[in-house]
Image (cartoon, coloured by chain):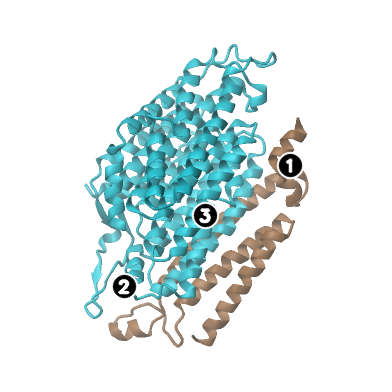
Amino acid sequence: MAQTQLAVLFTSTALIIIGLYSAIFIDNIIKKIIGISFIEEGVNLFIVAIGYKSGGIVPILMPGMDASWFSSNSAYPLPFGLVLTSIVIGASTLAVMLAFVMVLYKRYGTLSTKVMLADTSKKEEYDE
Amino acid sequence: MNELIPLMVIIPIIAALLISAFSKFNTISKILAFVVAICLPVIAIASNYGLHYFGGYEPILDNVTGITYHPAIVYSFTFLQQIFIAATGLLAFLVIFIYLAKYRKVSGPYLFLLFMGTASVTAMLLTDDIFHLFVFFEILALAQVGIVAASSIDYSYEMALKYMILGSIGSPIMLLGIGFLLALTGSVNITDIVYAVHNGLVDSKSPVFLISLGLIFFGWLYASGLPPFHTIKSGIYSKAEPHGAALLQSFTVISMISIVLIMFRIYSSLQIFEVLIVFFSILAMILGVSLALTQTDFRRMIGFLAVGELGFIGLGIGLGTQFSITAGLFQALNEIIITALLFIGFGAIVNATNEVDTRKLGGLLFYHPKVALMLLIGGLAMAGVPPLSGFQSKLMLVQASLNCGYPEISILAIMVSIATFVVFVKTYYSIFLKPKPKDLDVENKQVPKTMIFAMAILLIIVVLFGVYPDVVTNGISNFVGGIL
């Protein structure tokens, strides 16, 4: 495994672990969402690393290139295509989550998940 | 007509976009939604079985290695896909029909979400590409969140955000598992992955392969609402409009079976896989029915019962024989229909009383006898009382666990069914049979005829599958024989 690939895998693992810690243990909803983004980006980075080829060329078959030489020297393009889709999905999810946070911040005046997302059944009993 | 296969996904997506774009024109939106909703089950029934290669890219044979691989996305349409897509399509039609009749001015974005959710589960069932499945899994999660948030029920936003946060952790973890599979096999096509795994091209004992199982399994637990996600899943059902909840639970069941069947094809050689499924299924059965017993909100009660029923599906698939998987899939089909019937029926009660607390209800048998009768039959079907559909599938599951040499699982399944019956009877008594509380106002409120119509249709299917289970079990069994 190339050193670059190893470094990228290490970084992606670190991003996922930091993101999981933030998403599970930090109370502030914005920090939680930042943590979730860390997880998503860590996974994207991992998938990009799969397609990496040490000393490889960009996977675009240009006119005049020998097909067998190209296939043995180019990076694997499939992971890059997948990551592109994954980034779009992540951005959409992030936007929707932040929209919810905006509405709930106006309602509760706080970003604390303990207040905002407390057990709704208990809230209902309290309201009654 | 194999050309119809992609249309099952494309038509609801185009309808969703058009309805959203023309939501200012109320009549046009209503007509379009109604027409497309009718088409959903019809296309599934009219289409021939077969494969659809997107872009016309058929499988390529590598002359050097002798391996055939799939360069593009493939949709596979068999009896299993047909029956589940037709059931979801019918349910989507009934839900949209109830919604269109209930509101004079309809919401384009809400209809958009209903159609996108339906399109997503259809694609998840059809696809033979694991990343394509992941993309629609994410779209489905967004649609589910939107359907919950669009309801006018208190704390729906909080529940939607909570579901989304958990989903945003579960989905990337599942994607990471897909990434590991891609790293091992170089493909995201499920047939290619299965070929690589079962022909020794991938070491099925390697840690990377096991990690990929763990990660995808975690995503599956989130998608199915099995423990530890059972509370949030029943929570989102209780915060959606009742007709929306009826559709949401069908989305959950279809996500569950579409992912688990793929996992089964890839990981069936690992014994730990079947153990994990059976363990979490039993946990879901016990937790679902126990928590349902403690609920006073009947929407939440059905939500937990639905989670318990998911355990039966997982149990059938986890046992791993042709008969048990057939039983599990038949149970999945029955759960879609029966739980929808219960959600719509109890939705009719909410509509008539604006009350969801069983302690504040009572005496509704004389005000709404049709709803009471249909709910009773639905509840008995869920508990597994003969000759209804739930009985047939649960009997098959008990037989399957006995055949596999696990009589203790059979006893557990019977006990959970009895507990389900107790929970339902307790709730039914509270709502319909006990004396009406003085402050409960039900005099002038009628149950919409669309809800009665929807319940009647679902009830006919429940009785039909109960009396003639072979109509579906033979076809499902053939499908299962093909993947084993």
Q: Which residue is under mark 1?
A: A107
Quadrant of residue A3 within the rendered picture: bottom right
Q: Which residue is under mark 3?
A: B279
Q: Chain of mark 3?
A: B
Q: Which residue is under mark 2?
A: B199
Disc 2 marks a residue whose amino acid type is Asn
Quadrant of residue B430 within the rendered picture: top right
The image position of residue A4, as x and y in percent, is 54, 84
Residue at mark 2 shares a chain with residue at mark 3: yes
Which secondary structure, mark 3?
helix
Disc 3 marks a residue whose amino acid type is Phe
Disc 1 marks a residue whose amino acid type is Arg
Residue at 62% across / 52% down in the picture?
Answer: A97
The image position of residue B338, as x and y in percent, is 44, 33
Looking at the image, residue A51 lies above or below residue B264: below
Q: Are marks 2 and 3 in contact (CB under 8 Å)?
A: no
Q: As rendered, which of B450 and B233 lies closer to the eye? A: B233
Chain letter corresponding to the colour cyan? B
Q: Are marks 1 and 3 in contact (CB under 8 Å)?
A: no
Which secondary structure, mark 1?
helix
Chain A color in figure: brown
In 3D space, how far apart are the residues under numbered discs 1 and 3 (Cα atoms)? 41 Å
Q: As rendered, which of B417 and B237 lies closer to the eye? A: B417
Q: As rendered, which of B76 and B339 lies closer to the eye? A: B339
Residue B370 visible in the shown view: yes
Looking at the image, residue B316 lies above or below residue B32: below
In 3D space, how far apart are the residues under numbered discs 2 and 3 (Cα atoms)? 29 Å
Residue at 26% across / 73% down in the picture?
Answer: B67
The image position of residue A75, as x and y in percent, is 41, 80
Looking at the image, residue B438 lies above or below residue B292: above
Q: Chain of mark 1?
A: A
Task: Decide if residue B300 is on the left or right side of residue B385.
Answer: right
